[in-house]
Amino acid sequence: MSAMGLYTPLNILKPVAAGIWIADGPLVYMAAFGMRAPFPTRMTLVQLADGELWCHSPIAPDQALFAAIDALGPVRHLVSPNLLHYAHIAAWKQRYPQAHAWASPGVRERAACQHIEVHFDADLDDAPPPDWAATIDQLHFRGSRAMQEIVFLHRASATLILADLIENFEAEKLPTAMRWMARLGGVIDPDGKAPLDLRLTYAGHKAQARASLARMRAWQPQRVILAHGRCYLENAATELARAFRWLE
């Protein structure tokens, strides 16, 4: 895959609202429908009330990005939101040894299975720890038999931060094979959602997922940051109702 699919410029902090930024990274390759599929990556950085920094799904290490982050404040939290988003935490932990690495459900087992050495300091739960509760809310989105995700809300900007509960790939950015896979998975913009294989893992447990969704929508987010594809920077309530209609 060429530069198509990438949200350039890469490794640059892009402001979303006061105190929250995204940075787009290089491609990663993940198993999908029996193939290795290229995925664009995106991390989210939040400045907490005490000036310390919280990093959601760190992308591949980059020295220029580190320099820009260091100018904002000390990195104190490295967050794995689900068991697929953890691969670069070890490298960031080496760069920021005082940072706490936070584990999502199942990520320790996943890392061990993939022979990736990463140390986590604490586990994410259904409520934010005191470290960031004043700035960020969170909940455990339940119901999947395979992968559960911790979702977050930047309170001041009403920005929802997701990893794989919604993927929203723009067709024109994808090569032919990936476009076919994305259509099969139901994750093509403007109708992004959880990919088909993930949706199927909620069978028999959709009531749990609907309860999680109700809590998430009660936050009344105004925008949604996604790890893969085009974000929803407006009309968040409408986009969430559309993207999760498969739970009805």
Image: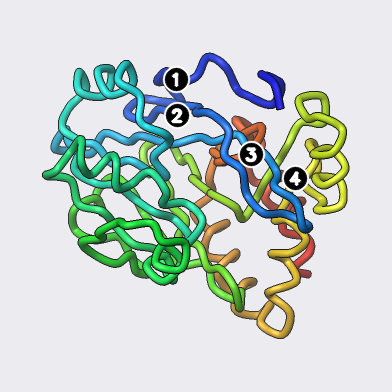
Seen in the picture, residue 166 relative to 143 is either above or below; the reply is: above
The label shown at residue 14 is: 1
Mark 1 or mark 4: name the one nearer the start of the chain. Answer: 1
Separation of marks 1 and 4 at Cα, in angstroms: 22 Å
Residue 98 position in % (x across, y down) = 11, 44
Q: Amino acid at mark 1?
A: Lys
Give the number of the mark in front: 1 or 3.
Answer: 3
Q: Which residue is mark 4?
A: 192
| Residue 196 versus residue 166 in the image, above or below | below
Judging depth in this view, the residue of 215 and 101 nearest the camera is 101
Question: CA separation, marks 4 and 2?
Answer: 19 Å
Mark 3 — residue? Answer: 39
Task: Tell which circle, 1 or 3, labels the residue nearer the N-terminal end.
Answer: 1
Q: CA distance from mark 1 to mark 3?
A: 19 Å
Find numbered disc 3 in the image and state the secondary structure of the residue it sits on: strand
Q: Specify few, some or many for label 2: CA neighbours under 10 Å numbering under 14, 14-19, or 20 or more.
A: many
Question: Seen in the image, is 220 located left or right of residue 98?
Answer: right
The quarter in which the N terminus is drawn is top right
Nearest the viewer among 211 and 12 is 12
Provide the secondary structure element on which disc 4 rests.
loop
Q: Residue at x 41, y 34 (%)?
A: 60
Q: Residue at x 74, y 64 (%)?
A: 197
User: Looking at the rendering, which quadrant does residue 41 occupy?
Assistant: top right
- Residue 34 point in image, percent of width and height: 77, 58
The 10 Å Cα crowd at callout 1, few under 14, some 14 to 19, many 20 or more, is some
- Please, what secondary structure does the residue beneath circle 1 have? strand
Q: Residue furthest bottom?
A: 204
